[in-house]
Image (cartoon, rainbow, N blue to C red):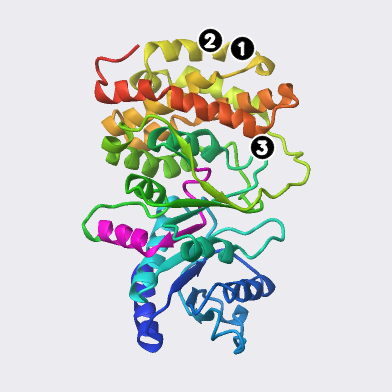
Amino acid sequence: MEADATLQQTDSTAEQIGSADLVVGILAESDSSAIAKMYDALGTLPGPLRIAVLHDDQQQSPATVNSETTLERAFVFQVPSPLAKRDVPATGVASMSETYQSVFAAAEKLQARGCCIVASKLEVATPPWAWRIAQPLFESQADLVLPHYARRKFEGLLNASIIAPMMRALYGKRVNNPMGPDFGVSQRLFQKMLAAKAGGNQLNSMASLTPTALCQNLQIIEVHFGSRVYPATDWSNMSSVLADVLNPVFVDMERNAAFWQRTRVSLPVRAIGEPFPLDQDSSAVDTRAMVDSFQLGNRELQEIWSLVLPPSSLLELRKLSRLPVEQFRMPDELWVRIVYDFALAHRLRTISRDHLLRSMTPLYLGWVASYAHELTLAGTMSPERRLERLSVAYEAGKSYLVSRWRWPDRFNP
């Protein structure tokens, strides 16, 4: 219903304004000052450009545009839109994907050369975000612009421990935030996403953007941003988050298997800008509760885990469950094999996919506890170095994944 309403609104607007070069969908909550700065910044893009902003708060849009700059620079105007402002991942990847698809459809209706989506709030004052996402679409002919957030050690760990390093190993490009949630998308790429949906191929517009661009060998550029405002993590209730986020990632993994089985090494993508410094990171997590959850899972989920994991991994997990909290460490090689084995079980539908991914929660919490312990003891080891080591382990373990993927019954160490 929401997508239909957006299309109806855009059809009406298209009749009035004809077309736009760029469509900007603003989903993030922002005050009037931030919105005004965003409009001003978009107006400095090399023109002449016509930029339509999908933003549903009429009171926060600027009343006029500086007529002195419209001939040489961009002309920015608002398109009233029913797009909902949402937080990620609180309302789910599926619902966010529908909203992204609506922005793509609006860009297609307005014959735009590109679109960008602003779904997050910045924590610190930096150059306006929409401008930084849109600029490479026009100045560097990028097909996909991805954010590289400045991140504290316990922020975005689901992405850092599974999604980003696994996509790096699979597709051969070192992207830091493959699921955004902030994106710049070229006409070529958003048309591919719309065509896939029209053809009955249900790509997830949030999870599938990066894999689609990688499989099509399109140009990807990362842009350094400040720290985004992450929703508070409820470590005691991660099951639904894991199921919601990982399901479309694993679906794409199956869809693109013919491509990623051919890649051998990973390469960095071009990055624009310099990393933003962060204040002192004083956050902490309750590792005792996490290890308790892991130990409980080891006692109560053996029947499910034995359908997914080979005997060697189950043996290692039982050994880990007997360790005192302060000594708990999960080797990277074990964690990587666990993730790959769950991806395979998802493909084979060993059990209900939702049940499968929820059963992964104690294992994920065990990894987070191990990560926290290592950073505490290492002292001088930065989160970036620690996560780079994990990414290398994902690449090293890819041969294990390929063997199990091709011969799931034969290759079971």
Tags 2 and 1 touching, CB below 8 Å: yes
Determine the secondary structure under disc 3. Answer: loop
Q: Residue 153 bears which disc, if any?
A: 3
Tags 1 and 3 touching, CB below 8 Å: no
Q: Residue 121: image x %, image y %?
A: 62, 59
Q: Residue 136: image x %, image y %?
A: 51, 61
Q: Residue 328: image x %, image y %?
A: 62, 17
Amino acid type indicated by mark 1: Leu
Q: Residue 319 bears which disc, if any?
A: 2
Q: CA distance from mark 2 to mark 1?
A: 7 Å
Tell me which label, 3 or 2, sits earlier in the chain. 3
Q: Is residue 394 magenta?
A: no
Other residues around mark 2 within 10 Å, as few (<14) / some (14–19) / many (≥20): few
Determine the secondary structure under disc 2. Answer: helix
Quarter in which the N terminus is drawn: bottom left
Q: CA distance from mark 3 to mark 2?
A: 27 Å
Amino acid type indicated by mark 3: Lys
Q: Which residue is mark 1?
A: 323
Tell me which label, 1 or 3, sits earlier in the chain. 3
- The residue located at (45%, 58%) in the rendering is 142
**Outermost residue toward the left?**
199
Asked if residue 204 is positioned above or below residue 127 in the image, the reply reads: above
Amino acid type indicated by mark 2: Lys
Determine the secondary structure under disc 1. Answer: loop
Q: CA distance from mark 1 to mark 3?
A: 24 Å
Foreground pick, 170 / 53: 170
- The residue located at (63%, 65%) in the rendering is 128
Q: Which residues are magenta?
A: 175-197
Confirm whether residue 118 shows in the render: no
Q: Residue 204: image x %, image y %?
A: 36, 52
Foreground pick, 244 / 221: 221
